[in-house]
Structure formats: C-alpha cells, structure tokens
Image (tube, rainbow, N blue to C red):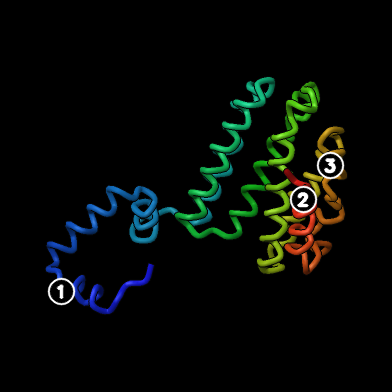
Amino acid sequence: MEYSKEFKQALSEFSPIEKDRLIFRLLKKDKLLSKKLYFELIDPETTDDKRNTMEEIINEKVTEISRYVANQKYFLVLIRKLSAEITEHVKITTDKFGDVYLNLFLVNKILEHNEKLGRQRFDAVYKLYIYLINKIIKALIQIKKLDEDYWLEFDELLENLNEKIDNNIYLSKLCVNNSFDFNWLKCENIPDHFELIVKNIKSEGFLR
C-alpha cells in the first residue's frame, strides 16, 4: 500500500502524545513488529546471539518431537511449527545467513533420526520427505544469492545432509524420482539458473 503525501502530512501533524498512543496501539496488534523494534532498538543480543539460541532450540525440540515419528501427521505439524520459529527469527533479525543455515541445520537434525524414520511405511513419510526436499531446494536457491564467503559453512551442512540422505533408502529414491541432483549438495555445483531448473521440475508435476 502506498501512502499519499496528504496522509503522511496528516500523520506528521500528530502531537508527540498522539504519536506514542498510535505506536503502542499498533504494537499491541502486531507482535512481530513489536519484537522487531525491540531487537533493533534496545535488545542487547546480536543477530549471531539469536541465531545461536535458535540453533539450540532446534537441537532440543527435534530431540523432543522425535518421540512422535511413528505418528507422521503430528510429527510434521510439529516440524512445521519449529520451521515457523526460524521464519520469525529471520523476520525479526533479517538474518539471511541464518535463514539458510538454520533450515539446513533443522533438516540435518531431523535426519539424525533415520533409524526411526526407516521403520515407517513409505506412504507415511512421503509428505515429510517432500517437505524436506523442498526445504533443501529453497536453501540452495538462497545460497546462490549470498556471498561466497559463506559457502564453507554451508558445504559442511550439505555434506552431512548428503550422507544422511544416502543412508535413507526412501528419501534417496524420492530425491531421484523428483529429479534432485545430489551434485547440487555442494555450493560450487549449484547451477546459475537453478531457480529456472526448479520451476521446470515443478511444472512437470514433481516435488509435490
């Protein structure tokens, strides 16, 4: 939404007390905006601090919710909620590096439970695995937009992912069946036109 000069002028004419009241009313209705402003204005924690905290949360929560692997529908709901926490962290801090790092870290932590996942039927884990493949692909797209200085850290996560996928029969087959190239799990091998490749794959009915 674009604001007219008249509207901006009207707002500028508010008294300091009126402006304060308006700000607090808006903050009460928008908790995310409130958290973002708090972070930007007075929060003693840095983006790195908050990313490290989020990493600890992921580590703890994936361990907790792994108890529900046998109930795949509920397990995926819990994973999505945890993913939403990462999204909130990114919106508050504008942490582009963390957006990639934390999501790849999340997928890695989930696949640490390959033994439990391997005992489930393919039709039970299908939605989870498609969700994870799409999450990896999104991270790869974002990596191409970030500075190459980050690649070393990402490559470590991607190498771990490659090993875990390789040790998961259903997931590795699903990757192959959805035209996922394992060579992409190294930053320098992500094609320049990767978004177009993914778009074409999805247009053929894959990754769903």
How crowded pointer 3 is (Cα within 10 Å; few <14, some 14-19, many 20+) is rated as: few
Q: Residue at x 68, y 54 (%)?
A: 138
Residue type, numbered disc 1:
Glu
Q: Which disc number belongs to residue 92?
A: none
Q: Residue furthest bottom?
A: 5
Q: Is residue 90 left or right of residue 25?
A: right
Residue pointed to by mark 2: 158
Residue 143 percent location from the top left of the image: 69, 61
Q: Residue at x 73, y 40 (%)?
A: 130
Q: Where 82 sits versus 97, above or below?
A: above
Choose the circle earlier in sequence order: 2 or 1: 1
Q: How many marks?
A: 3
Q: Are marks 3 and 1 in contact (CB under 8 Å)?
A: no
| Quarter placement of the N terminus | bottom left
How crowded pointer 1 is (Cα within 10 Å; few <14, some 14-19, many 20+) is rated as: few
Q: Residue at x 37, y 51 (%)?
A: 35
Q: Is residue 158 left or right of residue 1?
A: right
> Quarter-wise, where is residue 67 in the image?
top right
Residue type, numbered disc 3:
Glu
Residue 161 percent location from the top left of the image: 78, 44
Residue pointed to by mark 3: 163
Choose the circle earlier in sequence order: 3 or 1: 1
> Quarter-wise, where is residue 160 in the image?
top right
Choose the circle earlier in sequence order: 3 or 2: 2
Q: Secondary structure at mark 3?
A: helix
Q: Secondary structure at mark 2?
A: helix
| Quarter placement of the C terminus | top right
Residue 85 percent location from the top left of the image: 51, 43
Q: Secondary structure at mark 1?
A: loop
Q: Which disc number belongs to residue 13?
A: 1
Task: Tell me the distance, in whole angstroms, between the alpha carbons under discs 3 and 2.
Answer: 9 Å
Residue 141 percent location from the top left of the image: 70, 60
